[in-house]
Amino acid sequence: DNKPKFPPSYEVHIAPSTTLGTTSNSAPDYWSVGGFDLKAIVAQAYGVEETRVDFRDAAAAGKRYDVALVMPKAEDHDAMMRRIQDALKEKFNLNIASEDEPMDVYVVTAPYGPGPNLRPAEESMGGFTGSSSGFALPEGLRDTPENMKNAMDKKRVSRGITLDSISVSNGTIEDFCRVLETGLDHKVIDETRLTGRYEFRVVRGNRTRDEFFDMLREQFGLAVTPEQRDVPMLVVRSN
């Protein structure tokens, strides 16, 4: 049973986390996360990608917590999330609002339509989009979230990209862009106007970021160019 061991109430329990790794569980009458940093918890509570959260206090954003709410009775998910949001704002004295921010981004377009390897999916229901990223920690370092993040950042600096492959099964180009963004140094904006579902796998191999972009254009018809856009962000400030 993954349900937190708190008596049912409307109190949101928030405490510093001492566990390695992360957990996330929910049901109609409870919601809990463990081991995530505050930025990730805010993203989950507001239903946005973590890359779309601009947490101005980096030190506070990186601290890890366990958060749990066990309700006396089942409640609508959005209503439960509003309780979590209110508790986070009160506990950490935060102001959280959606704002458009101008920034450097990568814009993905399909100027000539889908490329030869961008195959339409046969299924109409469900879908999966995932990625793989390989790296090795220096000898003697534990696989803590902080050490793993530092290793990924070093890979991003050296190659320009951290992803080794992206797999899309009955997924959209928007799904693909969302995953691609996790391995790059800027946000990724989908302007392809491709609305279908696709089945494809992209393997980077030893390619640099720019060589990877060349492959996306030649094999999949997806052109990636640096631009500037106003991007909707969830901005988190300390009061």
Image (spheres, rainbow, N blue to C red):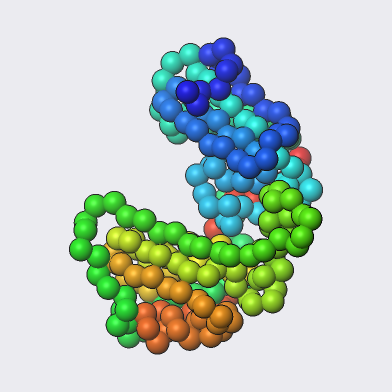
Q: Position of residue 172 (x, y in %)?
A: 35, 63
Q: Residue at x 40, y 65 (%)?
A: 167
Q: Residue at x 54, y 42 (%)?
A: 44
Q: Residue at x 61, y 52 (%)?
A: 53
Front in this rendered view, residue 144 or 220:
144
Q: Position of residue 155 (x, y in %)?
A: 67, 70
Q: Residue at x 32, y 55 (%)?
A: 127
Q: Position of residue 189 (x, y in %)?
A: 49, 68
* Number of marks: 0
Visible in this render: residue 103? no
**Quadrant assignment for the C terminus:** top right
Front in this rendered view, residue 191 or 166:
166
Q: Is residue 56 above or below residue 152?
A: above
Rendering quarter of residue 100:
bottom right
Rendering quarter of residue 218:
bottom left
Visible in this render: residue 162? yes
Front in this rendered view, residue 21 or 120:
21
Q: Position of residue 47 (x, y in %)?
A: 50, 44
Q: Is residue 18 above or below residue 220?
A: above
Give left or right: position of 65 versus 134: right
Q: Is residue 65 above or below residue 55?
A: above
Q: Is residue 205 above or below residue 57?
A: below
